[in-house]
Amino acid sequence: MIKGFSRIRLLALLPWPKPPGGPHRSVCHVCDTLHDAQPLPEGMAAYCQCCGTVLYQNRPASLARATAFSLTSLILMVVVHSFPFLVMDAAGIRTKLNLASAAMALVNEGSPLLGVALALFTIVTPLLLAGGLIYVCCPLMFGRVAPGGVLVAKWLNKTEPWNMIEVFLLGVLVSLLKLGKVADVHFGMGFWAFGVLMLCMAAAVAGIDRDELWDRLEVAKP
Amino acid sequence: MNAPLPRGADKGLAGCHTCGKVSPVELGACPRCGSHLHLRKPDSIQRTLALMSAAAALYIPANMLPIMTVTELGVVTENTIISGMITFWQTGAYPIAIVIFTASILIPLLKIVALSWLCLAASGKLHPSPGMLGKIYWFTELLGRWSMVDIFVVGILVALVQLGNYMTITAGPGALAFAGVVVLTMFAAMSFDPRLLWDRLELLRLASPQLKKEDT
């Protein structure tokens, strides 16, 4: 195995490749203005000449960043789901809450749809996003596409807006204020992990530009 | 900047909405990712209006019906979004009252108004000013998700407060209606195609060459 090691080329450290063929063009998705897609130095962004929307940007060490932050997010999810999120003492009863139990409680208390929505936006979507990003970006570092990688990359786009971790965190803070008079509530380990998870997910999603990801996917070998 | 910049649709080129690759629209599907190619989102205005009307209709029960029911020592109180906000205001928690008001009442209303305005402008009933309207569009896209906060609050309270006879909280029908409003307005914003605004501007420009370029 050592023999092949030197031959592994970390594409993550190679510049953003241009797929074969051309001319390389970019269309602004807001105003439809056509541009020549010039290669960018790292850390730079290309803006639409007509309306100023960001067309694409070359983020430094993008694949490594997306992979690392997604992996961290997955680990944090384990912590979030295995430790209590909030602990409440009221009327001599101690109630421990985590995300899954909140969704289950809604289902059991007669609001199954709300329970499903809560689970979708705070558990399922983040998991799919982080898992999908690893599945696509990690093999890409070696210039490879995992089987079905293109399909996963397509779905990454679609799931992104439904990831509502930060909104849930605001909801927790509002709930605490509502319960302030009724009960004694304190944060569990899960809550702090959730806060860090929010930051990691944001960093993971912001890790790689869409155009760069797809250009790399196009030149990658199966 | 004086000469109009070339646009994708003029050359029959479509940017793939999934992967961004620019290809001739007659291919039908993106050669890179297989997504359906189109110059403009299909039936954008009708879809946006339909989803938005449904959201506007749900907005009424969402605010009228209780979002949660609190049973404390046998006494049942029903909370609507507005009553919850007023309680915060009366107890002096002004910042949180403002947050709830903004996220639950103002943003959905603004979204409905903004999307109607965008649809009117895109269909040529109003003068399109893509620069400003684009900002409004971007703003509604950015803020739409935060309206979910009330639904999450209800979820957390229902899960935490199950204290038998002392106090229990259950979700009310208003919560479901409100979740519907948020999801529908998100879909409505996604189905709107801002390029239609620029198409209108282009038509205006072609109709009167003297027209000064809009401040964009």
Image (tube, rainbow, N blue to C red):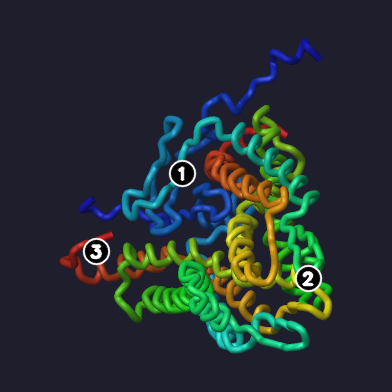
Do the residues under discs 2 and 1 have CB atoms within 8 angstroms? no
As drawn, which residue projects farthest toward the top? A3
Residue at the spot of label 2: A91
Mark 2 or mark 1: which comes first in sequence? 1
Packing grade of label 3 (10 A; few <14, some 14-19, many >=20) is few
- In the image, A40 versus B64, the foreground residue is B64
* x 63%, y 77%: residue: B180
Give coordinates of residue B19: x percent, y percent: 57, 49
Do the residues under discs 2 and 3 have CB atoms within 8 angstroms? no
Q: Amino acid at mark 1?
A: Tyr
Q: Nearer the viewer, mark 2 or mark 1?
A: 2
Q: Is residue A87 left or right of residue A20?
A: right
Residue at the spot of label 3: B214
Q: Amino acid at mark 3?
A: Glu
**Residue A209, labelled with which disc?**
none
Packing grade of label 1 (10 A; few <14, some 14-19, many >=20) is many
Give the Cα separation between the discs numbered 1 and 3: 25 Å
Name the chain letter of the residue that bears numbered label 3: B
Name the chain letter of the residue that bears numbered label 2: A
- In the image, A187 versus B197, the foreground residue is A187
Give the Cα separation between the discs numbered 2 and 1: 56 Å
Give coordinates of residue A98: x percent, y percent: 76, 58
* x 81%, y 67%: residue: A92
Circle 1: element type: strand
Q: Which quadrant is home to the C terminus of chain B?
A: bottom left
Give the Cα separation between the discs numbered 2 and 3: 64 Å
Does residue B201 sit above or below A148 in this rendering? below
Q: Amino acid at mark 2?
A: Ala
Give coordinates of residue B187: x percent, y percent: 58, 70
* x 58%, y 40%: residue: A213
Residue at the spot of label 1: A56
